[in-house]
Image (cartoon, rainbow, N blue to C red):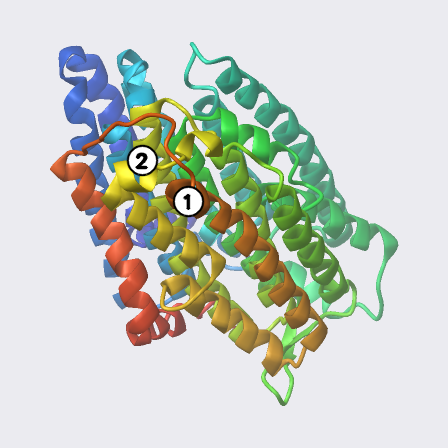
Amino acid sequence: MALNTIFNSFYLIEPEIAVALLLLIVVLYDLAFPKHKHTLPYLMLAGLAVTAFFTFRQYYISSGLVFESGNVQGLIAVDSFAIFFKLLVLGASALVVLFTISSEEMKGSNDRIGEYYTLITGMILGMFFMVSAVDMIMLYLAIELVSLSSYVLAGFIKTSKRSGEAGLKYIIYGAVSSGFMLFGISLLFGFTGTTNFYQINHIINHLPEGNFLLSLAFVLIFVGFGYKISAVPFHFWTPDVYEGAPTTITAFLSVASKAAGFALLIRFIKIIFFAGFTSEGYWTLSPVFNWTYLLLIVSILTMTVGNFAALWQNNVKRMLAYSSIAHAGYMLAALTMLSEHGILAIIVYFVVYGLTNLGAFYGVILIHNKIKSEEVDDYDGLGYQMPFLGVAMTVLLISLTGLPPTAGFIGKLYIFIALLDAPHYPLAVILALNSVVSLYYYVRVIKHLYLNKPKQEREFSFSSGQTLLMLLIVIPVIVLGLYFGLLLELAKSSLTIFGF
């Protein structure tokens, strides 16, 4: 009976099967055709397209749990919430593959490019399971699959000392956070006797009050989430890893990995603690643990530390790393509302933030190809020497700030709407002040591009493929800032979490 249930559930994990097969195909192709490594990115793109087809097809499948039998609940859930984040991961992955083709930094590791794409595929598989996990064991295995692949990718460039340092720091911080999380999971299992989210929900909703060990377990588990989304005080790995890792991997970690971490955190809180809705439509959570205070404190710390630390950075990648931390704080502020409005704001924000941040890192890659530097002082006058790229970077940085008429304004607007609907005016004021702070370090890059004199007269040109790819990123950033109705409808259709 159990085997029949498993086999009958395979159609629900077609995207995961497609990614696993892609991983196997990439490995075998790299071994069989070592002289045709230049075709690997196109093989990856074809595999991601096939996976996207199976993922889109899941929109027409009714929500369900995979591997459910009798009293044994499923390991992963298939719902519109998971499908949205899978598509987001696939989109980010496809762009990173295209970035890699343009990256001069990665050409020095071309002999190991097969391993590079294999590890990226492993990360994608892990993130697919992360966004769908409804069991503590699956949660931990998915996070470890993503983490182990990303440790190697962070230190992938063997000739770079800072890349090796990034990989070492990443694995040390990752191992510590993983240990905390595993200890929290063991405490939770010892208290409830189950690892399934839905069964844990049933148990803790019948508890009269909080319990110290149970609260400790949730705090320790949150350490793992905080590490994955770069929330303060679990962010220490982020600037060093973002600066030292290949820029393509930095872009991937800043969007795809963060998105998977947020999806898992949202699913964890809503399924395990959900007890109903208030008359205003906000979630009522089990009183055994107060998520509002924890998320509120972490959100304020994350956006504030991220923005103020970014002010002093001269390396553009390091500045974008702290910026990424601040953006995680903005999204945590929306999650603090514990409502469908808050989740809607996060989904909208992730689309515009992901597209904009990937574009900004692509600009860093193209500039590094030409000047071999990521220091902001070396960007002097590049706006005139690289006219198209200068304009593109300006648009992307304005969007990251959250100013109209870019898509970044829409993302931040919906977070403000979620906060003001609560109403939570103090947090909205703190977010607004932090946005003003962020304006300084984004405009600083624009100042170097246009207002500082170039250090030497030179002209740069880019291939038509590189120009087209940047246009494919910048145009939607502008269009979504003016016409965002379709994005809002997509976000609303992606709110369903199985069982709630």
31 or 5: nearer the viewer: 31
- Picture coordinates of residue 330, whole percent (x, y): 58, 60
- What secondary structure is marked by label 1? loop
- Above or below, 151 against 316 in this view is above
- Residue 83 left/right relative to 307: left
Q: Residues within 10 Å of mark 1 (few under 14, many from 20)?
A: some
The residue beneath circle 2 is: 20
The picture quadrant where one finds residue 182 is top right
- Picture coordinates of residue 285, whole percent (x, y): 69, 71
Residue 146 visible? The answer is: no
Residue drawn at x 27%, y 66% as measured from the top left: 479
Residue drawn at x 22%, y 27% as measured from the top left: 25
**Amino acid type, mark 2:** Ala
- Above or below, 152 against 396 in this view is above
Q: Residues within 10 Å of mark 2 (few under 14, many from 20)?
A: some
Whichever of callouts 2 and 1 sits on the residue coming sooner in the sequence is 2
- Picture coordinates of residue 87, whole percent (x, y): 32, 53
The residue beneath circle 1 is: 451
154 or 300: nearer the viewer: 300
- Above or below, 307 against 119 in this view is below
Residue 55 visible? The answer is: yes
**Amino acid type, mark 1:** Leu
Residue drawn at x 13%, y 17% as measured from the top left: 36
Farthest residue in the bottom direction?
A: 279
3D distance between C-alphas at marks 2 and 1: 49 Å
